[in-house]
Amino acid sequence: MSENTRRPFNVIPDDPEQSVYRFIIVSAKRARQLQSGQRALLPGTTKKPTVMGMEEVRRGLIQYWDPALQKSEQDEGGEQL
């Protein structure tokens, strides 16, 4: 008997700095962009935009910013005019 030792293609990062929810939202937005006709950043064998979006975000190819983090950093630094 052979054991199935394949790792899943897409692994959700478990970094405490990164939120799983954020990963899913950014991946979904990227998949929507791919469905709208934007080109993938990775040469891939799969044509599924959800899989491509997840892989691009996991590899760090998609830049995004979190307005909640930016607001909390401004609050810690004091009022800025």
Image: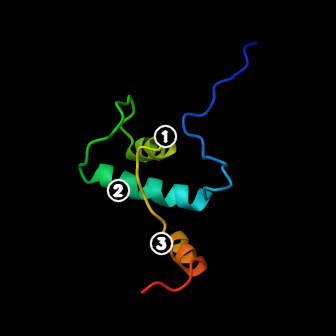
The quarter in which the N terminus is drawn is top right
Judged by depth in the image, the label closer to the viewer, 1 or 3, is 3
Q: Secondary structure at mark 3?
A: helix
Q: Earlier in the sequence, mark 1 or mark 3?
A: 1
* Dot 1 amino acid type: Arg
* Dot 2 amino acid type: Arg
Identify whether 4 is placed above or below 10.
above
- Callout 2 crowding tier (Cα within 10 Å): few <14, some 14–19, many ≥20: some
User: Given contact means CB atoms under 8 Å apart, are the residues at marks 3 and 2 in contact?
Assistant: no
Identify whether 34 is placed above or below 75.
above
Q: Residue at x 57, y 77 (%)?
A: 77
Identify whether 44 is placed above or below 56.
above
Could you tell me how far apart the alpha carbons at marks 3 and 2 are, in whole angstroms?
21 Å
Choose top left, top right, bottom left or bottom right for residue 16: bottom right
Position of residue 49 measured from the top left corner of the image (x, y, whole percent):
38, 45
Q: Is residue 19 left or right of residue 26?
A: right
Q: Earlier in the sequence, mark 1 or mark 2?
A: 2
Residue 59 image label: 1
Q: Secondary structure at mark 2?
A: helix
Q: Residue at x 60, y 41 (%)?
A: 11
Choose top left, top right, bottom left or bottom right for residue 43: top left
Q: Secondary structure at mark 1?
A: loop
Residue 32 image label: 2
* Dot 3 amino acid type: Pro
